[in-house]
Amino acid sequence: MVKKIIIKNYDEFEERLEDQDVEISNALVEVALANINSKKRFIPALEIELEEEETIYDISLDTRDMVGTLEQNLEIQERHENYETCFFIKEALDKLR
């Protein structure tokens, strides 16, 4: 299931990516965990709507990079003390390795 996030403009989007925004991380992790056994190479994950630009970015997860994606998001989740999510990420990483 694709998660939709509405953001004011591209500058805010860039800033949130640089800051490793937890809302974006939560959405990516949720989609990744739901598709951990997927046979598809690319999984639609996020729809980022930029209100001011009237633009939509579709972001997909590459299953070949699933371990790296989960590892990167594990760090974000740890910083935000989302330990339950960390547990599920670690379980998924153990399965994938």
Image (tube, helix red, strand yellow):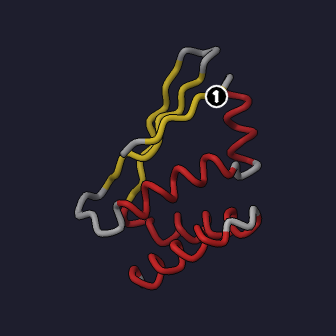
Q: Circle 1 — which element? A: strand
User: Does residue 11 lie above or below 62 as drawn?
Assistant: above
**Image vertical order of residue 1 relative to residue 54, above or below:** below
The part of the image, by quadrant, that contains residue 12 is top right
Residue 67's spot in the image, x, y percent?
48, 72
Q: Residue at x 67, y 34 (%)?
A: 13
User: Which residue is identified by label 1?
Assistant: 7
Q: Residue at x 58, y 67 (%)?
A: 85
Would residue 22 appear left or right of 46 to someone viewing this image? right
User: In the figure, residue 9 lies in which quadrant?
Assistant: top right
Residue 14 vs 19, above or below: the answer is above
Residue depicted at 44% across the width and 65% down the height? 65
Frontmost residue, 57 versus 80: 80
| Image quarter hosting the C terminus | bottom left
Q: In terms of depth relative to the viewer, which is nearer, 72 or 82?
A: 82
x and y percentages locating residue 18 in the rendered image:
74, 47
- What residue sits 52% from the left and 20% below the top? 55
Q: Position of residue 53 (x, y in %)?
A: 60, 15
Residue 83 vertical position relative to residue 16 in the rendered view, above or below: below
- The picture quadrant where one finds residue 52 is top right
**Total count of labels:** 1
On the picture, is 17 further left or further right than 90? right
Query: Which class describes the residues within 10 Å of circle 1: few (<14), some (14-19), or many (20+)?
Result: some
Q: What's the residue type where badge 1 is placed?
A: Ile
In the displayed structure image, the side of residue 53 where residue 36 appears, left or right:
left
Identity of the residue furthest to the left in this view:
39
**56 on left or right of 82:** left
